[in-house]
Amino acid sequence: MLIAYWIVAALTALACLGAGGLKLIRPYDQLKGAMGWVNDFRPWQVKLIGAAEVLGAIGLILPMATGILPVLSPIAGIGIALIQAGAFVTHARRGNEQQMMIANMVVFALAGASAVLGFFALS
C-alpha cells in the first residue's frame, strides 16, 4: 500500500507544484491571458490558490517522508481534492473550459486516491 501511495502522491504533487508554482511565479496580467478563469478573481486570490496548491503538494510528500506527523499527508490529499472540486465548479460555471474540467477531475481522483492510500498506509 505504501508503494502505491508514493506513486499516486508523487503524481499529484507534481501536478500541484506545476500549476500552483505557475500561479505564484507569473504576474497576474500574464495569467489573465493564458487562463480565462483568472479574470473572475482578484490577483491576491489567484496567488492564494497557487500557494494552497504548492503547500498541498509539499504536505503530500514531506510528512510521510520524514515520519513527522504523517497523518498530515492524507489530510493534504483531501485539501487538494477540495481545491480541485472548486476549480471544477469554476470552470463548469464558465462553460467553455472542458479541457480544464477534465484535468481537474484527474487531479481530484489522484488526490482522493492519495488520501485513501495514505490513511491505509498509516494503519
Image (cartoon, rainbow, N blue to C red):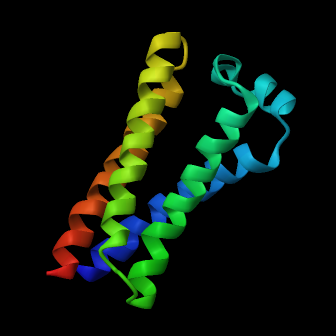
Residue 35, percent across and down? 69, 27
At 30% from the left and 81% from the top, the residue drawn is 3
Q: Evaluate whether residue 110 shows in this view.
A: no
Question: Which image quadrant is residue 55 in?
Answer: bottom right
Q: Residue at x 50, y 21 (%)?
A: 91
Look at the image and tell me in which quarter the N terminus lies: bottom left
Number of numbered discs on residues: 0
Q: Is residue 90 above or below residue 84?
A: above
Residue at 45% x, 89% y: name it. 66
Image-based side of 108 in relation to 95, left or right: left
The quarter in which the C terminus is drawn is bottom left
**In the rendered image, which quarter is residue 45 located in?**
top right
Residue 122 place in picture, x, y as percent: 21, 80
Q: Is residue 79 at least partly visible in the picture?
A: yes
Which residue is the extreme one toward the bottom?
Answer: 67
Q: Residue 115's x, y, as percent?
A: 28, 61
Percent from the top left, x then y, of residue 11? Answer: 47, 62
Q: Nearer the viewer, residue 73 or 7?
A: 73
- Identify whether 123 is placed above or below 94: below
| Residue at position x 70%, y 42% in the image | 47
In the depicted view, which residue is nearer to us: 97 or 86? 86
Above or below 85: residue 116: below
Q: Is residue 119 above or below residue 41?
A: below
Is residue 101 toward the left or the right of residue 40 in the image? left
Pick whichever, 24 or 6, lies toward us: 24
